[in-house]
Each structure stands twice: as structure tokens, then as C-alpha cells.
Amino acid sequence: MPIAMIVHGGAWAIPDDQVEAHLAGCRAALETGWAILEGSGSALDACEAAVRLMEDDPIFDAGTGSHLTAAGTVELDAALMDGRTLRYGAVANLRRVRNPISLARRLLEGPGTMLVGEGAEQFAERQGLALCSNEELIVERERQLWARWRAGQSSTDSAAGAEATVGGHDTVGAIALDGAGNLVAANSTGGTPFKLPGRVGDTPLVGCGLFADTNSGAAVCTGWGESIVRVTLARRAVELLERGVPPQAAAELAVRTLARSVSGGSGGCIVLTPDGRVGLAWNTRRMAYAYRQEGGAAVWGV
Ligand code: ASP
């Protein structure tokens, strides 16, 4: 069976001076996942490793370096879905887990469910995953953005607030097809900038932020979560694949539906078929991505 992998580093107006870092992060994640697939590793291992790398890369809104909530804390969501069994592991509202994707993996291979907040962190401890402090997940860039947003909120300086609110949506995601023919979808996020504490977007929701079915294909989404949930974007993209729509057209159609169905609906979508063809589309200014298909070289861009 051919192997293939695609990753993304978020769909939003990535500023010019952050493009290189986004591309480098996507390429590194792809290389890591690809090495696992090439060595006959599983799509689960490839996705987990690729997403972990992006969670640890502070340029992305996932793991360390995530956007802060309105309360100035980091709250993380992630999920992983196995296309062969349709099992998933999902986590939300984590404050003390450095790599949420690895906790999602434990859940997929354990109870196969979604855990949030304290219960999820207790599960992580029982699984022997080290917890960190919330502070350790915060980087200076995000602290400053938050401070400017707060200043804009509490003063008449709405320009500072507005500028900061424009912020990013650089959730990360990955889909891999392994040599055994299994498709796995994964994603991880710190959510939207200055979100309400407790808010959960599309990322950890099966059918919204991700979907994988080895018989038909897989999709992973990024962008404004509230709009993505309303159209169950990932399931919609896979449904198009099921109807025989080619992957590039399926990704484009899904994103067009998002924009048409929800006022202000914005984001991006990556797609991979069971025979290793990719599709990718976004209606934001940019989306960082990298992919590779059996027999070909890595491709990346924004
Ligand atoms: N979809 C994520 C959310 O709404 C954000 C993103 O994709 O960057 O939480």
C-alpha cells in the first residue's frame, strides 16, 4: 500500500514575518511523521509524533505557545481518530498537559471517549504522563498580545484591542496513511485568542474538526471553530469523498460550504484518500501546510 501524509499549521492571516517559522514547523512535522511511515510505522504513531512536534513549537497555537483565554490562561484541546476502527480519543480544556495529543492517544487506545478538564488531567496522571504548570505553556509573545487586548478592553483604546483580536488561528493537524492501509486524523489547539474560559471549538469534536474512515478518507479542519461546528465540516468533506468527488475538489467544496452557510465562516481543510491522494483548501489569507505522497518529494506552502 502507498504511504502518504499531510499536515497543516493553521488557517489565518499569517503575518509575513511568521511565514518561514510556520513552514519550518510544518516541514519538520511532516519529516518526523514520514520517517515513521517509511520505517513501516503506523499512521497513529506518525500523527502523534508530528502533532507533538508542532505542540512543542511555540510558533503554533497548540501546546506551548498557545493563545491565552480571556482570563490569561492556556486551555488546550486535541483529538485523534483511527480510520480502521472509527475509535477516537479527545481531550478538551486541559491546563496542565504539555502534549494533549499523547493524552488523546491514550484515550483512543483506552476508553475511546472524550475527557475534559480536571478529569482528563487525572486520567493523564494515572497514565503516567507528567503534568506541567499552566505558566509553562505561556510564551512572552502571547502574554503581550493578551495584555494589549486587555488594555483595549478596559480603556477607550479600542485600536489596541481590535489589532490584538485579529490574532491567529494556528491550530495544528495531521493525517497519515500507513503501509497497512490505515488512515488516521489528528489535531491540537489552544483555541481562538482570548476565548471564554471553558470554551471548546471544533478541534476535538469528531465530525467537526476531524474525521477518518479507512474506507472513504479523512479530513482535518482549522479556523473559526464556531463556524466549523455548525456545518460539521470534516464529516462533510469525507462525505464528498464517499460520493466520488476528487480530494482537491472535496476540500474546496467543503470550505465553500462553510463560507456560504455561516456568516463569516472561515477556515481551512486538509483531506487524504485511502489511496494516498491529498486535497487542501482555505478561505483565510493563508494556511501553512506540508505533504508528501509515496514516490514523490515533500511539498509545502502557505
Ligand atoms: N479551530 C480552532 C478553534 O476554533 C482554532 C484554529 O483552528 O486555529 O478552537
Image (spheres, rainbow, N blue to C red):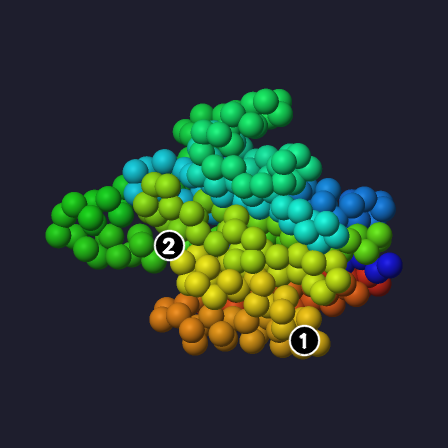
Q: Residue at x 44, y 38 (%)?
A: 93
**Cα separation between marks 1 and 2:** 36 Å
In percent of width and height, residue 294 lies at: 82, 61
Residue positioned most to the left: 156
Residue 225, numbered label = none
Secondary element type, mark 2 = loop
Residue 134 appears in view: yes
Return the disc, 1 or 2, that comes first in the chain's sequence. Answer: 2
The foreground one among 233 and 192 is 233
In percent of width and height, residue 3 lies at: 80, 57
Residue 33 appears in view: no
Q: In this view, does 223 lie to the left or right of 6?
A: left
Q: Quadrant of the N terminus?
A: bottom right
In the rendered structure, which amino acid carries the disc numbered 1? Arg
| Label 2 neighbour load within 10 Å: few <14, some 14-19, many 20+ | many
Q: In which quarter of the image is the C terminus?
A: bottom right
In the rendered structure, which amino acid carries the disc numbered 2? Gly
Choose top left, top right, bottom left or bottom right for residue 230.
bottom left
Where 136 sits versus 87, above or below?
above
Residue 167, numbered label = 2
Residue 243, numbered label = 1
